[in-house]
Image (cartoon, helix red, strand yellow):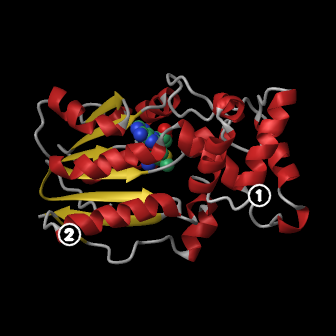
Amino acid sequence: MDLLRCEPGQTYVDGTLGGGGHAEEILKRTDPDGVVIGIEWDQKAIDEAGKRLNPYSSRARIFRENFIHLSEILKTMKIESVDGILLDLGLSSIQLEREERGFSFRGEGPLDMRMDERRDCTAANLANGLPLTELERILFEYGEERWGRRIARAIVSEREKNPIQTTVALRKIVYGAIPKRFQSRKIDPATRTFQAFRIRVNEELENLKGMLESGWKVLRKEGRMCIISFHSLEDRMVKEAFRKWEREGMMRILTKKPLTPSEEEQKKNPRAHSAKLRCAERL
Ligand SMILES: C[S@@+](CC[C@H](N)C(=O)[O-])C[C@H]1O[C@@H](n2cnc3c(N)ncnc32)[C@H](O)[C@@H]1O
């Protein structure tokens, strides 16, 4: 919030509104007339955020959209530039905890993983339909999974017998494919595979890339962009884009090293442990 420099009278974009926690804080800090444009593509999250932001409804504009469409949204609002953009990438706790959404390898649910349920492609469609080489690619690239080849082969061999329909089925395949002695006790062996599928289902890297290509254009001079990422692929993309902007004289990096949660914060909120926050200011 401090990096975003929230001040009354200004307009901020929360591109990943989720349950509205960040947006609420921005609205409090920009009282009485700051505006938040909240973008979120998951209807259930929007419902939560709507309740939470009800007391500020005159200053919160909520759009069910992909944040990659930020400039179009601003055009419809006849807004040329904003004072800050915040992205808090990845999943919300609400999504992770609802087993029926299929994100969690701990629970039992349909193999879905769509953050925006209007999209066509589910994780089950990918598991049952992608060619072997593409399965391998997403496991290596998006999951950084060294056992990607074995897992991809196991998926293909399983689906020839039975379609893979549930989170439990996928998890079992992963457990069977990674040799026992290489299965970590600290991190669930299915973590990387689930991450890979989720990133591909939601085209998360493409969306971030789109924002990194065009987001800075709608920032006013001295406006700030803050991005919180949760895995190295995303953080690398943010770091490289910020450096490029700085080299080209468009932005100034305010976080030479990313900010990470303190031990105390990690204890209170273990899901924050891998978070990295980077911020840059428009010149
Ligand atoms: C970590 S949560 C955000 C939590 C939020 N900051 C809060 O305070 O409650 C990330 C949210 O971003 C949404 N999201 C991820 N990618 C998106 C995209 N491309 N467009 C719109 N929303 C997206 C997810 O659906 C999820 O609800």
Label 1 sits on what residue type? Asp
Camera-nearest residue between 62 and 191: 191
- Please give left or right for residue 57 compared with residue 42 in the image: left
State the separation of the CA atoms marked 1 and 2.
38 Å
Residue 250 in view (yes/no): yes
In the rendered view, tell whether residue 246 sits above or below residue 230.
below
Residue at figure coordinates x 34%, y 39% from the top left: 67
Which part of the image, by quadrant, shows the C terminus?
bottom left
Q: Which residue is mark 2?
A: 246
Measured from the top left, where is residue 95 in percent x and y? 59, 39
Residue at figure coordinates x 31%, y 47% from the top left: 211
Measured from the top left, where is residue 27 in percent x and y? 29, 46
In the rendered view, tell whether residue 248 sits above or below residue 40.
below
Which label sits in the foreground, 1 or 2? 2
Instruction: Report which quarter residue 54 is drawn in.
Output: top left
Which part of the image, by quadrant, shows the N terminus?
bottom left
Instruction: Report which quarter residue 75 is drawn in.
Output: top left
Q: Contact (CB < 8 A) between labels 1 and 2?
A: no
What crowding class fits label 1: few (fewer than 14 Cα within 10 Å), some (14-19), or many (20 or more)?
Answer: few
Instruction: Report which quarter residue 155 is drawn in.
Output: top right
- Please give left or right for residue 60 compared with residue 142 in the image: left
Camera-nearest residue between 121 and 267: 121
In the rendered view, tell whether residue 214 sits above or below residue 224.
above
Q: Which residue is mark 1?
A: 188
Q: Earlier in the sequence, mark 1 or mark 2?
A: 1
